[in-house]
Amino acid sequence: FPGLNREKFRLFVQVLAGLSGQTLNYSEVARVLGVSQPTVRDYFEIAHGTFLWRKLPAYEKDARKRIVKAPKGYFRDSGLLHYLMRIPDLQALLGHPMVGRSWEGMVVEEILRQLNALGIAYDPYYYRTAAGAEVDLVLEGMFGLVPIEIKRGQRVDQRDLRGLNSFVKERGCAFGIVVNNDFAPRLYTEKIVGIPFECL
């Protein structure tokens, strides 16, 4: 890329790894790097366009509550993410604060990869209210609107489903999905189905 400051961009990629799974604050990233906000936005566009970073915009349609509008993103290659975070092996990963966000990013990538392989058109989003209710992935396409909550554990309780239940109810979704590490698919409510990651 002509005019790209390579040293700043290398630092940006290192910072980016720590941002995986979080909503983005461009001004904070610009401050850390010592560059302008437009430059940071260009860096994010390069990272997204080169398949290093997956940007998810906020789902704002038909909002009945105050919505967090900042985009969210994931490092697309979990192996590279772990390398940049200096996580050497599985044991270190399982005890690392990044483990949940790494898992979430991997699941998002697997879902979208399979949709792409099937040639199914969709737009991906995430959803979060100012009060903290969240849905990790929202898919919109000819198939309708499908909210997906991603949990690394095997068990999911009703508190974990509040954001998903609210989204399904407010927008009249046919169903919502929970992806986790359960042993078998299960029905949590009439409209919430659980699918183990290994079944994807």
Image (cartoon, rainbow, N blue to C red):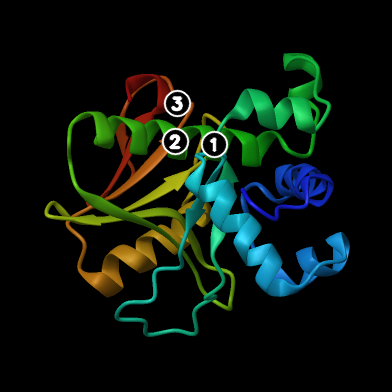
Q: Which mark is residue 129?
A: none
Rounded to the nearest whole Å, what is the CA distance between mark 1 and mark 2?
7 Å
Q: Residues within 10 Å of mark 3 (few under 14, many from 20)?
A: some
Residue drawn at (31%, 28%) of the image: 185
Residue drawn at (72%, 15%) of the image: 90
Q: Which mark is residue 182?
A: 3
Three-letter residue code for mark 1: Arg
Residue 184: image location, x then y, percent: 35, 22
Residue 163, above or below 116: below
Residue 117: image location, x then y, percent: 24, 29
Q: Which of the pair 77/184 is nearer the observer?
A: 77
CB-based contact (under 8 Å), mark 3 and mark 2:
no
- Tell me if 30 is positioned left or right of 128 in this view: right
CB-based contact (under 8 Å), mark 1 and mark 2:
yes
Residue 47: image location, x then y, percent: 58, 47
Helix or strand or loop: what does disc 2 sit on? helix
| Front position among marks 3 and 2 | 2
Q: Which residue is mark 1?
A: 76
